Image: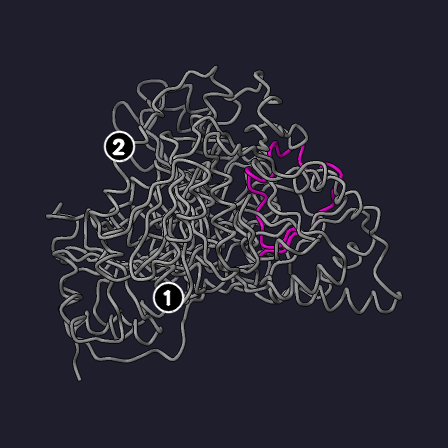
Amino acid sequence: MKITGADALLKALEQEGVEVVFGIPGGASMPIYDPLVDRSSIRHVLCRHEQGAGHAAEGYAWVTGKVGVCMATSGPGATNLVTPIADAKMDSVPIVAITGQVPTPVVGNDAFQEADITGITIPITKHNFLVKDVADVVETVREAFHIASTGRPGPVLIDLPKDVLLAETTWKWPDHVTLPGYKPTTKGNQRQVVEAVKMILKAKRPVLYVGGGVIKADAHKELHDLATAGQLPVVTTLMARGAFPDSNELCLGMPGMHGNYTAVTAMQKSDLLVALGARFDDRVTGKLAAFAPHAKVIHVDIDPAEIGKNRAVDVPIVGDCRDVIGKMAAELIARQEEAGGPPDRSAWLGQLREWRQAHPYRYDQQPDGPLKPQYCVERLRAFADDDTILISGVGQHQMYASQYWRFERPRHWVNSGGLGTMGFAVPAAMGAKVGQPDKRVVAIDGDGCFQMTAQELATSTTEHIPFVTAILNNGYLGMVRQWQELFFDERYSGVYLNPDVPDYVKLAEAYGAVGFRVDHPEEVDAVIEKAYAVEDRSVVIDFRVDPREMVFPMVPSGASNDDIILSPDQASPHADPMEAPLA
Amino acid sequence: MSTNGNDTLHTISVLVEDKPGVLTRVANLFSARGFNIDSLAVGPTEMHGLSRMTIVVDVETKTLEQVTKQLNKLVNVIKILEHDQGSAVERELMLVKVRAGGEQRQRVMEIATVFRVNIVDVTNATITLEATGKPDKLQALLSLLEDFGVVELSRTGRIALSRGDRGIKERVLKAAND
């Protein structure tokens, strides 16, 4: 039986287990939308901007581990997907973006709504396809999902010209994928594992440096086995919050530019870093030449190109974190049993405990003083359970969220790490809620971020996807303001937004959501309780927070992690902001 | 174009699927990651559907590993072979039009004979030479011809095959871990 390319596409999506597509239709993609009417197995969530559709697909993928799907038409629809696709590339999020394209006879003719989206997205996709023959549609979908979801996950784009969607083909689902140039190494080399374990047993000051790869690989159980059996302290990067429970005494929390003193210093003083699905990002290492100068390095990653990219490695292990960490845990346990127990780590663990007690995260919420953003995060957490999914945008509020939320489970934290995409939170929260409809979803957002993608609240209302957005509203682009205060002599330039514009309560109500405003600390608890009690609609809470509050600790860009600044009075006016660009 | 004596130059052969856009993907990767291409030559191979790129890349040794690892991540890249100095036969084709009027003509023809290169076009004012050889031979020839005045120059970029019995299919550049 003959079916159209569009039908073949939808059938192939069904075969891949796709239950939801976030998208906006347009001229070139209309052939897909017609047969969509008859397909009850695929839900289409009509977004208000393609960027929102892309981030929603990412949020869905973060919390489910499945491939998120977004769809746009040709030209501007497709180019609006560029930001979420780049975001997914940087954070290794498995998404498939489907775009309509002008008909093949006019491709290259500057036709209406034509953009060379495969050309545009080559550097920001794991791979992309322009399908010119209807006979290739199904195979391409199969390959796209395979590439997006295996190895180091990432975004894949499929560009489908309108005439290809309308042409007829015969349905055939390929038994297997033939990609001769794509064979990710998933099984770790056992000899390397043994080398690594020997090194761990010898180390005096080991640290497990856990990155997002552990969550992507669903390796949290294996990590728990390795850390607890070996009494190995764990830092969880911004991408890995929740990979290891914050409540475990071995958990040191987040390292890096705004990480806590203990996590940062443990890495600096370490004699062995065991990097697990982490990539020695500049936000973690600070000045690379001064990073963890005494540490040998074991680096486990599924992407061989990450190994040795930034830091020389003593024991490289290419493989899937779940496989490798599982093997490491088994080997470690066997060797420790032989030796009659784990090595004595009391000195190191005692040192870490001391640091933790001396240098916790600090802020000062006076009962009658200005509302502190950190306090809002702590109270939002206090009323939430461990199963609450937290989303954040990018900036000060993101750091407060990572610092002050207590993460206990993997896939319960979603943010834009690598690309640092403002406006990520609202649409990603929506996608997360679609992926985990039975869990509460809370987005902590900034007022600057919120205004970039707030229109997806309309989608939330019309599609019945309720979540809570807590805006830490300081009326500024706060992180830029912080840098201007610290490094540009308090010369504030282009950062003041005005906390009263828009009126966030009215805006929420205009979108069919519930709006609350909180000005004083004593109002916080009551409003959070009311907000969490609303289950049938989205809620926006406008927390009017102190604009002078800054994120600490802080390692200035380009500085060594040894020069961590713990509080504003320690902030050095001599730090050179031009050494590395603000990002 | 640099000569073979520069030890930051490495020749790699990249076996790729002959699909639309594959050259763009490779070129984009080089520019996006800040790798420098000294020369690049592409053509079909003995295997249907596969093309071979010979890329002379200008890198520090540390980044050569990054170049090959990043190239390996491209889905259309099948295999990469790094040619060590001396382990490969390397050739390049050059067409060069030289000023050769009057008494200069005889001297250009003598140089052509010494270098065993072909004269493929002659006018009253110029001679066009076709030269094939190792990069250092072409460089030596070119520096002699520059004295006469080079009117026009076109080079193919280097191509290379490893010495010995085996083809690229059996010679995979090892990844970091295996």
Nearer-the-camera pick, A134 or A387? A387
| Contact check, label 2 and label 1, Cβ < 8 Å | no
Nearer-the-camera pick, A161 or B159? A161
| C-alpha gap between disc 2 and disc 1 | 32 Å
Q: Residue at x 20, y 58 (%)?
A: A100
Name the mark on residue A501: 2
In this view of the protein, can residue B116 be seen by the observer? no
Amino acid type of the residue that numbered disc 1 sits on in the rendered structure: Pro
Nearer-the-camera pick, A436 or B118? A436
Residue B155 in percent (x, y) is at 38, 37
Q: Residue at x 77, y 44 (%)?
A: A271
Q: Are marks 2 and 1 on the same chain?
A: yes
Q: Residue at x 62, y 54 (%)?
A: A276
Nearer-the-camera pick, A455 or B169? A455
In this view of the protein, can residue A406 be seen by the observer? yes
Above or below, comparing residue B124 to residue A89 in the picture: above
Above or below, comparing residue A450 to residue A461 in the picture: above
Residue A89 in percent (x, y) is at 42, 50
In the image, the segment drawn in magenta is A275-301
Residue B53 in percent (x, y) is at 43, 51
The answer to if A56 sits in the magenta stretch is: no
Amino acid type of the residue that numbered disc 2 sits on in the rendered structure: Val
Secondary structure of the residue carrying numbered label 1: loop
First in sequence, mark 2 or 1: give its number: 1
Name the mark on residue A437: 1
Q: Residue A171 appears in which quarter of the rendering?
A: bottom left
